[in-house]
Image (cartoon, helix red, strand yellow):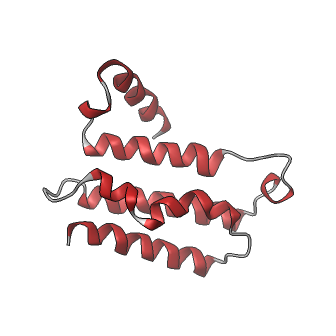
């Protein structure tokens, strides 16, 4: 996804974001989440310098859930990309690394909420 993102960003620089399909916009958003919300770490923050594997998996699995579910609905005629980025769980992804006490079950509940919110966009 990150490699595809770099190619899409080149297209955006040349012809603008409007030229991208919803699928390409989704790739850009998910790749941004991976870069900014998953890979980025602050070495000077005691909580962020070391992230337990369970939390890393929960965050990455949540990002992948967005990608998987959005791919299922993105080609529906009634789907509008702006509605995807406006759902509450979409913004919550950026704050997952601050959820220090979350368990595997908490991440699963969050992913279920994500799936429900995205599926509701075309209902």
User: In the picture provided, is 21 more to the left or to the right than 13?
Assistant: left
> What's the residue at 41%, 34% (across, down)?
4
User: Splitting the image into 4 quarters, where does residue 104 fall?
Assistant: bottom right
- Quadrant of image for the N terminus: top left
> What's the residue at 50%, 59% (across, down)?
91
- Residue furthest to the left in view is 77
Measuring from the top left, give residue 29's x and y in whole percent.
43, 46
Above or below, 65 against 108 in this view is: above
Above or below, 114 against 44 in this view is: below
> What's the residue at 60%, 45% (across, down)?
36
> What's the residue at 54%, 63% (across, down)?
92
In this view, the residue in front, 59 or 83, is 83
Measuring from the top left, give residue 41's x and y in whole percent.
73, 47
Measuring from the top left, give residue 99's x and y in whole percent.
68, 69
User: Splitting the image into 4 quarters, where does residue 50 fall?
Assistant: bottom right
- Quadrant of image for the C terminus: bottom left
């Amino acid at each position: 996804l990150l490699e595809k993102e770099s190619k899409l960003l080149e297209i955006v620089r040349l012809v603008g974001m409007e030229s991208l399909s919803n699928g390409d916009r989704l790739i850009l958003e998910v790749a941004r989440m991976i870069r900014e919300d998953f890979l980025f770490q602050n070495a000077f923050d005691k909580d962020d310098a070391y992230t337990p594997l369970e939390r890393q998996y929960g965050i990455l699995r949540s990002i992948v859930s967005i990608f998987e579910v959005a791919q299922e609905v993105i080609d529906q005629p009634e789907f509008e990309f702006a509605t995807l980025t406006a759902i509450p769980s979409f913004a919550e992804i950026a704050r997952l690394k601050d959820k220090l006490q979350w368990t595997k079950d908490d991440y699963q509940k969050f992913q279920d909420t994500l799936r429900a919110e995205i599926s509701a966009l075309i209902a």
